[in-house]
Amino acid sequence: MKYDIVGVGDAAYDNLCIVENYPEEDGSTHILEMHNQGGGCCATALVAASRLGFSTAFIGNTGDDYAGKQIRDTFIQDNVSIEGVDIIKGRRSSLGFVMIDPVKSTRTKFPYRNNLPDINWTKEKYELIRNARIIHIDSTNINNAMTAARIARQAGVPISMDGCSRKADNTPSAQLAAMADILIMNEAFPYYTSGKNTLEEAMKFFADAGSRIVISTLGEKGCIALIDGELRRFPAFRVNALDSTGAGDVFHGAFIAGYLRNYSLEECIRYASAVAALKCLKIGGRDGIPNHQETLEFIRKNSEG
């Protein structure tokens, strides 16, 4: 089957706790609420795109553990195909533990990484990528992402990348970013990966390397895009946010949805910003993701900045 968007990257199962306050070392605090839902950079982007009206599929591995089952089940619930997913016996799936302070509107993440092997690239997985309208990758597993990008490049399929790494030594991520047509990064990735001292230098570095669209997301401060060689800031929609978990991942999925609708760059950013803002009205990375009509209505009723 052919899909609009095929993703290769991180998929996790998140455990989110709203706490009274963040405890000091050797201290304790009360949990006020607990939430469980699917997570992961690439996986949540695919869920967002699916809710916005596009067919999506994930290629990757999960363990045969409880978290792995939840990852697969939550994909199915949101109409993300798992025909490219292999279950690896005796291996651990990714888990995320998130503490949310509702008073300060902050969150602290504790990722528990998987011990899964690299993807076994079968003919069927190759075809999923070759037949996609676009692929979306993240930098959590460079080997998997690089293989996916090479397959897509050879087939002429556009590549969207989530620059989510915060590692200082990031040469492999820089090589991967050079293959991306759409590169949307967190606020740290441009500096760590390019080695440049200013955001403008860093973003031009990626554009010179080959990326046609280069954006850095800044959370509640919005995002910055490189347009016609100049940096342009786009403010975020103002909402009474409960939790920002997954907002960047959702931004990616919504941006791709706008791109596939042939929106202009400015329209893609506005659309993605609206979807990310609506997500923040609920706890976790996925419960608050709207559909297309809800997003358009929100944009109509609200102004940015």
Image (cartoon, grey):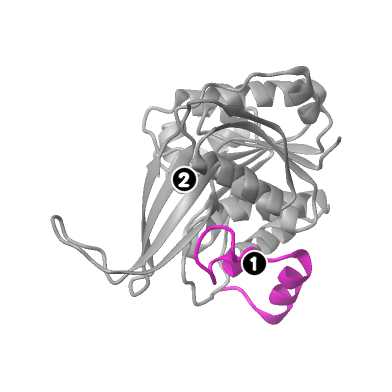
- Relative to residue 16, is residue 39 depicted above or below? above
Specify the label residue 196 is tagged with.
none
Amino acid type, label 2: Leu
SS under mark 2? helix
Q: Quadrant of the C terminus?
A: bottom right
Q: Is residue 282 in view from this perspective? A: yes
Residue at the spot 64% in from the left edge and 19% down from the top edge? 120
Q: Is residue 175 magenta?
A: no
Q: Which mark is residue 199?
A: 2
Q: Nearer the viewer, mark 1 or mark 2?
A: 1
In the foreground, 51 or 176: 51
For label 1, the residue is 274
At 47% from the left and 51% from the top, the residue drawn is 14
Q: Residue at x 23, y 66 (%)?
A: 29
Q: Is residue 290 left or right of residue 261?
A: left
Q: Quadrant of the image for the N terminus? A: top right
Q: Quadrant of residue 28?
A: bottom left
Against 162, is 156 above or below? Answer: above
